[in-house]
């Protein structure tokens, strides 16, 4: 079983915790959408409004599509991304 935790606006609107038998992290959003109507469209709407989310898989931030294909995941966190216009050091 994979535990999925939402944070920020998504947690307020759809609930904080879910548990699903999913094969890969990429299946997490579809699993929530199947149980909470309008979940994926809401993420898209929030993105258009400037709210971005990071996906954390077993305490590691996803930075490449290949990380969403790995099986055997125990925990996924979908968290608001911290972004800004400051210089990258």
Image (spheres, grey):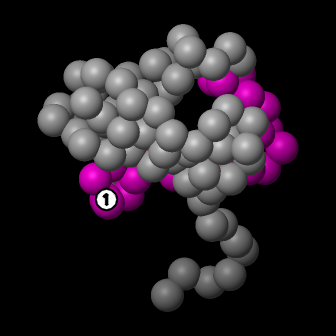
Left or right: where does residue 80 sit relative to residue 74?
right
For label 1, the residue is: 60
Give the residue displayed 65% in from the left and 66% down from the top.
83
Q: Magenta stretch: residue 20 in it?
A: no
Can you tell which quarter of the image residue 84 is in? Answer: bottom right
Callout 1 secondary element: strand
Q: Residue 5, position in %: x, y?
A: 49, 45
The residue lying toward the viewer, choosing from 47 and 3, is 3
The residue lying toward the viewer, choosing from 24 and 13, is 13
**51, above or below 31, in the image:** below
**71, above or below 31, in the image:** below
Give the residue displayed 28% in from the left and 22% down from the top.
21
Can you tell which quarter of the image residue 35 is in? Answer: top right
Q: Residue 33, position in %: x, y?
A: 57, 18
**77, above or below 46, in the image:** below
Q: Residue 42, position in %: x, y?
A: 73, 28
In the image, the segment drawn in magenta is 39-61
Is residue 43 something one can see in this rendering? no
Left or right: where does residue 66 sit relative to residue 52?
left
Is residue 71 something one can see in this rendering? yes
Give the residue displayed 65% in from the left and 44% down from the top.
11
Q: Residue 68, position in %: x, y?
A: 31, 36
Left or right: where does residue 40 sit relative to residue 26?
right
The residue lying toward the viewer, choosing from 16 and 49, is 16
Left or right: where does residue 49 sit relative to residue 83?
right
């Amino acid at each position: 079983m994979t535990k999925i935790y939402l944070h920020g606006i998504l947690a307020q609107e759809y609930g904080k915790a879910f548990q699903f038998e999913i094969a890969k992290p990429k299946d997490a959003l579809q699993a929530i959408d199947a149980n909470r109507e309008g979940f994926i469209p809401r993420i898209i709407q929030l993105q258009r409004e400037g709210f971005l989310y990071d996906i954390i898989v077993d305490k590691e931030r996803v930075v490449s599509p290949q990380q969403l294909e790995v099986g055997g995941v125990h925990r996924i966190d979908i968290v608001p991304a911290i972004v800004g216009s400051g210089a990258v050091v």
